[in-house]
Amino acid sequence: MWTYTSYILSKYFEKIAAKSDELKFSELCDFIFNTLWRREGVVFHDGVKDLYLDLEYLQKIGILEIQKNENLDKVKIKVKDPEKLRDVAKIVESSSDVMKLDILREYVARINKAIEYVVI
Amino acid sequence: MSLEAYRIFGPLFYVELTGSYDLKFNRNPDKFLKYDLVNESSEPLPLYESVNVPKYIMYLTLLPIVSRLAEIKQLAYTYHLIPGGAHTRYEHSMGVMLRCERLLDKLSKIVNEKCKNSALKIDNDEKIVLQIAALLHDIGHSSWGHALDGITGHVVDLLRETLDNYLFSPRKLDTTVALYLLLYNEQLTKALQTCSKEIKAEALSKHLNKVIAQIIMEEEPPFFSELETDKNLMIKVHLLTTVLGSYRGRGGVNADRLDWFIRDAHHTNLKVKLDPSNAQKFEDFLRSNIENNFAIDIENCEFAYISDKIFNKLMEDLREVVYTSIYEGAERALIDSWLTRLAFTAIDVIYKIGEQISSPSTTTRAIMGFLLMSDYEMKECTDKILTLAKQNINLLGAPAPSTEFISNSTDLLCIFDHAKYIMHSLTSRPFKTKYSPKMDLHFEYLDFELIGKTLITITADNMGTLIERAYNTCQKSEVCKLAMIFQNFLVAPRLDPITACQIPIMESNMRSKFKDVNIHVLINYYLFRKLDDYFLKEVKDLISLKEILTKQDKLGKIPFIFILADKTKEEKVIEIFEEACAAVLSYFMNCFAFYQ
């Protein structure tokens, strides 16, 4: 679900890594698999490799740049087009209103809650 | 609480649904089964000579929550077309168990040779865990094949209040239900406690239900705090998971897939449909594969995989054949869309009854009671639920078009009795092709004379053209529009296609417009699943998306929406198609307009 990966990244850069446009892949994994997954029970990715596929897609459509490394822990993600990232995040945010699906609102709420948890 | 609603719906809700769950599936096994009185055994199994059933597995198979798998057909209604395709999930589960056992023997030698950490060695404990996980891997599977995958998001959403956080993963309904059962079902949790006495290693036995759940979920990170602290335990869990299944993006040996692939092909006598070279390849594959006659290896002592590239390629090719010959096709898509709608409506009614006369936790048990029914029971019960709901629609407290959609579904259930005739008509007679000048689209339809109905299809090809038209009205950037399509036309319908695509509203509007024709609108969930398979790999803009949706060798011919209408004259068929397309186009355009 690359749109949710975008939303997570957008919020992460907005609230947690606000002073940077770069993020370690391991830090993102920690947030997705330890905070979001464990605290909020939201599962968007089967595992690290599945998440990486989403990032590669975001690179393909020009939102991100992946600074590759054979060791996944050393991989870095750089936002190439912050505006596009924010636009995708807005689409995700408003999707529950467009589709009239409460479950989509719940996803966004839980991601926001997980972000707030890290901020605090 | 409405007393009238209680009087009308109470017996169905409390006796047939909640009662069935509590008395049959949630009953403490100690009250009707003694572990010490169960013996190991051997059971003959198609494709294999026989399967040895150790005592702990035999004990589990005697539980109603497990033995129900013998009353669920693996391929749902495929037997209407292919009489042999009537095998059950129980047969498949036993097949997976045997295959896993043999694979683990092979793997233990590799682990012992390659992994220095003695804590990772595989012995009898791991074998027991994997056998149990294999037997239970489909424990949450409901009847009607994969038709209920299309209501996953709907069910998870309805049960949000009572389901634990862990369950908020609406990818597949069966894993959500499996997790619920492994954590909260008394019959299963108690039985697993009993079986855990066979396991010496405390790390595996102490939280056996959670270890099994972690394996069945096929998700890498630990779900449960009890498992996260023991690194070696998680490594073993990963190893066992990749024998039984696979992780997305990483892969695995996937004994589950190997068994259903071969078993389904065997029972449907697939070889007669193949060209001679493929038939021979398939025969060789089938024979050698039963013995797991391919090379496997491990990565970092943690993940098992098939290292035989030739085997993998052959398997991929043959899997494609199996998919197109058995699982796909308009007849399967129609029947599954039909069942998706019936289950969606039935569960909606159960939930609405629960809101009127019960509590959220009891409603969850009532829905579980429905989901765990056998193929036959589920049809009978759906009939009762929908008939009762139609007769007392005002008591459900739901707004139209929801109530109208429920009432309309009852008629659909009556026509379903002709499923065999419909499936055979779809495979034996060609669709008629028509052109709509108004929409500038070609479409197909087929008459079912025996039941006086006409089936009109809006295909992925049509969908691609309609998306393009809506797309061109939106001024946003390409990436934005791509995200909008993925989020709203793929993620949302994958969770809940009926709600996301506003099918009740579409049907209601079409019925208002064509008052003299009875119309039902069905949506094909599999199209979204297939589109999801392609998206990351092949879609980067509108052109590539349209190519996937319109090309005949990709999704082109796959139905997006079915319209089942009373048989009528040809001009009206065209009008109905045009009205449906106009509704779809307007839906797409409204979605795009939201972001302007």
Image: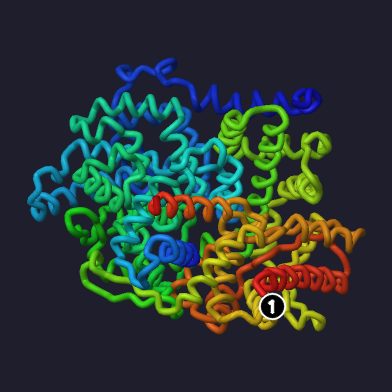
Label 1 packing within 10 angstroms: few (<14), some (14-19), many (20+):
some
Q: Position of residue B304 (x, y in %)?
A: 24, 56
Q: Position of residue B347 (x, y in %)?
A: 65, 41
The quarter of the picture where the C terminus of chain B appears is bottom right
Q: How many marks?
A: 1
Q: Nearer the viewer, residue A119 or B384?
A: A119
The quarter of the picture where the N terminus of chain B appears is top right
Q: Nearer the viewer, residue B86 or B517?
A: B517
Q: Which residue is mark 1?
A: B470
Task: Examine the rendering and report whether any part of residue B322 can be seen.
Answer: no
**Residue extending farthest top:** B31
Secondary element at image label 1: helix
Using the image, determine if residue A104 lies above or below residue B319. above
Residue B285, quarter of the rendered image: bottom left
- Residue drawn at point x = 57 percent, y = 30 percent: B361
Q: Position of residue B499 (x, y in %)?
A: 67, 55
**Residue extending farthest right:** B516
Report the colour scheme.
Answer: rainbow
Output the chain of dot 1. B
Q: Nearer the viewer, residue B332 or B365?
A: B365
- Residue type at mark 1: give it: Ala
Task: Examine the rendering and report whether any part of residue B511 can be seen.
Answer: yes
Using the image, determine if residue B505 lies above or below residue A39. below
Residue B501, quarter of the rendered image: bottom right
- Residue drawn at point x = 41 percent, y = 35 percent: B182
Residue B370, quarter of the rendered image: top right
Q: Position of residue B68 (x, y in %)?
A: 49, 34
- Residue drawn at point x = 21 percent, y = 59 percent: B296
